[in-house]
């Protein structure tokens, strides 16, 4: 599933990789982020839908899982987008689709660097940034980078309900913990 997010980002978004060594190889990858800038979106283009691998992955999932995604997850996410900033405003923003940091690299500023580098770019353009997250820990991390929670929902599923928080940062918003955004 995550590989299709990365491929979609490579095809129609922006993909960033952070490493811990002098050369970037599999062993040195500390984290990566997939962003969709203004006018871009996850599976927004035919090329992304066709070549990200998502359709093949979807076919491998159970019919119940596919039905849940189509009838519960996606409509709830679309409603949340519309309710918080509107789908057109989200499309005009930088949207963090995916962020991952290797467990051994967490707490070293890797994720923060992957987020704040785009915030710097977005600020120069006067563009807002937004993201979704599921954990209270992540909320506290993103708040320290200037994000606010606009709304939260619980997504029901047969394997357990999941919290889902929509967060937003206005362009050039102050950073609460005094972190510096590099230009």
Image (cartoon, rainbow, N blue to C red):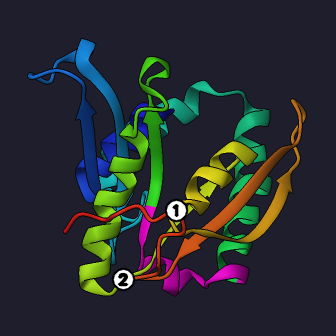
80 relative to 77, above or below: below
Q: Quadrant of the C terminus?
A: bottom left
Q: Residue at x 9, y 23 (%)?
A: 22
Q: Is residue 85 magenta?
A: yes
Residue position marked by numbered label 1 in the rendering = 177
Write down the quadrant of residue 126 in the picture: bottom left
Which of these two is toward me, 45 or 149?
149
Q: Which mark is residue 46?
A: none
Write down the quadrant of residue 28 in the picture: top left
Asked whether, in this view, residue 177 is left or right of residue 64, the answer is: left
Sequence-first tag of 1 and 2: 2
Residue 135 appears in the picture as rendered:
no
Which of these two is toward me, 34 or 65?
34
Residue position marked by numbered label 2 in the rendering = 127
Give the Cα distance between marks 1 and 2: 21 Å
Asked whether, in this view, residue 99 is left or right of residue 126, the answer is: right
Closer to the eye: label 1 or 2: 1
Q: Is residue 128 magenta?
A: no
Q: Position of residue 36 (x, y in %)?
A: 36, 63
Around disc 1, counting alpha carbons within 10 Å, would you say few (fewer than 14), some (14 to 19), or many (20 or more)? few
Q: Residue at x 57, y 73 (%)?
A: 168
Asked whether, in this view, residue 90 is left or right of residue 74, the answer is: left
Q: Position of residue 6 (x, y in %)?
A: 35, 40
SS at mark 1 in the image: loop
64 relative to 173, above or below: above
Q: Given the current orientation, which residue lies at the most extreme left position? A: 23
- Kindly check if marks 1 and 2 are in contact, taking CB atoms under 8 A apart as contact: no
Highlighted magenta segment, given as a residue range: 83-95
SS at mark 2 in the image: loop
Asked whether, in this view, residue 134 is left or right of residue 168, the answer is: right
Q: Residue at x 61, y 85 (%)?
A: 86
Write down the quadrant of residue 12 in the picture: bottom left
């Amino acid at each position: 599933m995550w590989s299709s997010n990365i491929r979609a980002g490579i095809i129609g978004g922006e993909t960033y990789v952070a490493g811990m060594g002098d050369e970037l190889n599999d062993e040195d990858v500390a984290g990566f982020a997939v962003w969709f800038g203004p006018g871009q979106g996850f599976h927004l283009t035919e090329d992304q839908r066709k070549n990200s691998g998502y359709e093949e992955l979807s076919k491998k999932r159970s019919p119940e899982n596919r039905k849940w995604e189509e009838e519960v997850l996606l409509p709830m996410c679309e409603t949340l987008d519309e309710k918080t900033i509107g789908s057109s405003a989200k499309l005009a923003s930088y949207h963090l689709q995916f962020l991952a940091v290797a467990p051994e690299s967490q707490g070293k500023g890797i994720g923060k660097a992957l987020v704040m580098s785009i915030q710097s770019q977005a600020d120069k353009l006067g563009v807002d940034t937004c993201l979704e997250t599921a954990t209270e820990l992540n909320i506290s991390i993103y708040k320290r980078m200037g994000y606010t929670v606009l709304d939260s929902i619980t997504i029901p599923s047969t394997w357990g309900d999941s919290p889902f928080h929509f967060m937003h940062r206005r362009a050039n918003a102050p950073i609460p913990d005094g972190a510096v955004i590099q230009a």
